[in-house]
Image: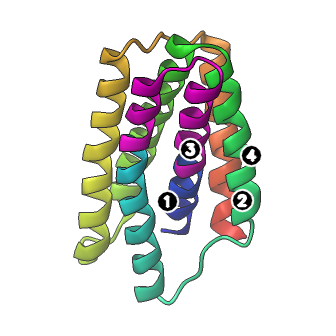
Amino acid sequence: MRVNHVGEVCAQALYNAQALGARTFSRDEALAQHFESAGRDENDHLAWTRQRLEALNDRTSLLTPFWYAGAFGLGLLASRLGKGISLGFVVETERQVEAHLAGHMQRLPSHDLASRAVVTQMQEDEARHAKEAQLAGGETLPLPAKLAMKAAAKVMTTVAHRI
């Protein structure tokens, strides 16, 4: 659940940065509001994962400020590359998160109904965010970008699990 919490910290940073970038770089208020709407769902996810960590007598990652700062920088960069790329970044991020959550669901104990409910709702929300970003004009990212994102996510999940 700590890894999921870190993912939600990163999602907050990404959506906050992309909303800021939409307003600053492209002066696109509708796009900024799109990111803020998705960010509100991620806020719920952040609270749910924190509550599950507390219920499981566990803690959040000690590197949370680092994760937020790094993701915020990536979100600003994506927004600087234009609306299509910024939305495409959301599509790819959410698809990778969906895959992570599917794997997590397989590893969760069948009796941990509370964690399973959290992960299930998160999966549904992430799928919706990807679909909305795609419909709003998200461009398909080039394969090297997708692979770099996947590698960064692997580092994040491995480190966050331990620290």
First in sequence: mark 2 or mark 3? 3
Q: Nearer the viewer, mark 1 or mark 3?
A: 3
The residue at the point 50 percent across, 55 percent down is: 8
First in sequence: mark 1 or mark 3? 1
First in sequence: mark 2 or mark 1? 1
Residue on which disc 3 sits: 16
* Residue type (three-letter) at the residue carrying disc 1: Asn
Residue on which disc 2 sits: 159
Say if mark 2 contacts mark 1, CB within 8 Å: no
* Residue type (three-letter) at the residue carrying disc 2: Val
Q: Nearer the viewer, residue 53 or 102?
A: 53
First in sequence: mark 1 or mark 4? 1
Magenta highlight on residue 16: yes
Q: Nearer the viewer, mark 2 or mark 4?
A: 4
* Residue type (three-letter) at the residue carrying disc 4: Gly
Circle 3 — which element?
helix
Dominant secondary structure of the magenta stretch?
helix
The residue at the point 59 percent across, 22 percent down is: 146
Circle 2 — which element?
helix
Q: Nearer the viewer, residue 98 or 81?
A: 81
Q: For the residues marked 2 and 1, what is the alpha-carbon distance in whole angstroms? A: 12 Å
Image: 75 above or below 91: below
Residue on which disc 4 sits: 70
Q: Residue 151 got which mark?
A: none
The residue at the point 32 percent across, 59 percent down is: 119
Q: For the residues marked 4 and 3, what is the alpha-carbon distance in whole angstroms? A: 12 Å
Circle 4 — which element?
helix
The span shown in magenta is 12-37
Disc 1 residue crowd, few under 14, some 14–19, many 20+, Cα 10 Å: many
Residue 34 image-quadrant placement: top left
